[in-house]
Amino acid sequence: MLLHDKVCIITGAASLRGIGYATAELFAEHGAKIVIADLAMNEKIAADVRMSIDNGISGPTDLHGVRCDIGSLDDCRTLFEGVISRFGRVDCLVNCAGVVKSQPFLSISEKDYDFVVDVNLRGAFNLAKVAVEHFVVRKGGNIVNVASVAAQRGGGLVGGAHYAASKGGVISLTKSIAREYGPQGVRANAVCPSMTETGMLDELTEERFREIVAAIPMRRAGKPRDVAGACLFLASDLSAYVTGATIDVNGGSHIH
């Protein structure tokens, strides 16, 4: 098992259709102790996620759900303090939390901008700050941030300029952490998915979906588990000498 006894916090894991959930399931298969954090988290959601993962891997999962508003630094500190109190440490943070809004640039209001950036970039910053504080004391730790191909190509299929900008900020933040805290044993990497079959695609018509897939070299959309696999690699010791990297999971739709 690649993550045996590792303590991993995964954000944005409340939806059974999402990348966060797929990552939690795959990490559980590899022996991790998992804390899933989400603004929507409650006892029922945590129980549903745990039951779904247990059924998927045919065994009990050491998983706990915590409600957390990642836009609040205090909430992020409380999250980490609770996990450390329970397990004694945190080994890895996987930030899958994110929101998207499809809007032309000139129609993006200040409120729209604040909403997207507060979750996608401020949230990643807050989580990373608290994680690094803990990792520096431990002289080791690992951050995996889920960004987006939108940050690389100037906009996504469903997200506007504010979404692309926020995810571009996540990539730059990740590189900055890797460079500054590598000497303290902290690794930080980003994953850039393209069109992935999550709730973010619900607004696409079937015709538009087929058009997009036809232009992807691998001729399919990504699955949440495809992205989870990249997260697993970066969270494990298989990537022990990888930091500051951006791993593309896009089926060849953006080769650069």
Image: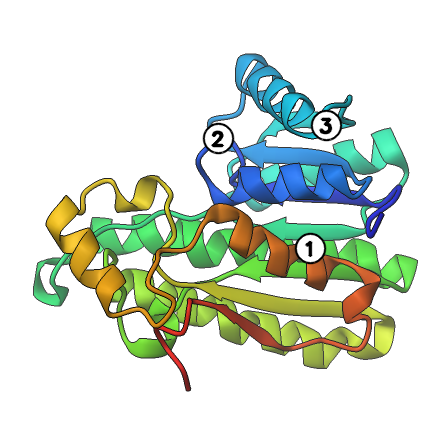
Q: Which residue is mark 1?
A: 232
Side (left or right) of 216 relative to 185: left
Q: Nearer the viewer, residue 76 or 214?
A: 214
| Residue at x 70% of width, y 61% of height | 233
Q: Which residue is mark 2?
A: 16
SS type, badge 3:
strand
Which is closer to the viewer, label 3 or label 2?
Answer: 2
Mark with earlier residue (2, 1): 2
Q: Are marks 3 and 2 in contact (CB under 8 Å)?
A: no
Q: Are marks 2 and 1 in contact (CB under 8 Å)?
A: no
| Residue at x 73% of width, y 58% of height | 235
Mark with earlier residue (3, 2): 2
Image quarter for residue 89?
top right
Query: As shown in the figure, which amino acid type bears the numbered disc 1?
Result: Leu
x then y, percent, for residue 97: 49, 46
Q: Which residue is mark 3?
A: 63
Image quarter for residue 86?
top right
x then y, percent, for residue 251: 42, 67
Residue 78 shows in the view:
no
x then y, percent, for residue 145: 57, 60
Query: As shown in the figure, which amino acid type bears the numbered disc 3?
Result: Leu
Residue 238 shows in the view:
yes
Query: As shown in the figure, which amino acid type bears the numbered disc 2?
Result: Leu
Categorize mark 3 by other alpha carbons within 10 Å: few (<14), some (14-19), many (20+). many
| Residue at x 40% of width, y 74% of height | 252
Side (left or right) of 239 relative to 256: right
Categorize mark 2 by other alpha carbons within 10 Å: few (<14), some (14-19), many (20+). some
- Image height of 30 relative to 37, above or below: below
Q: Nearer the viewer, residue 224 or 15?
A: 224
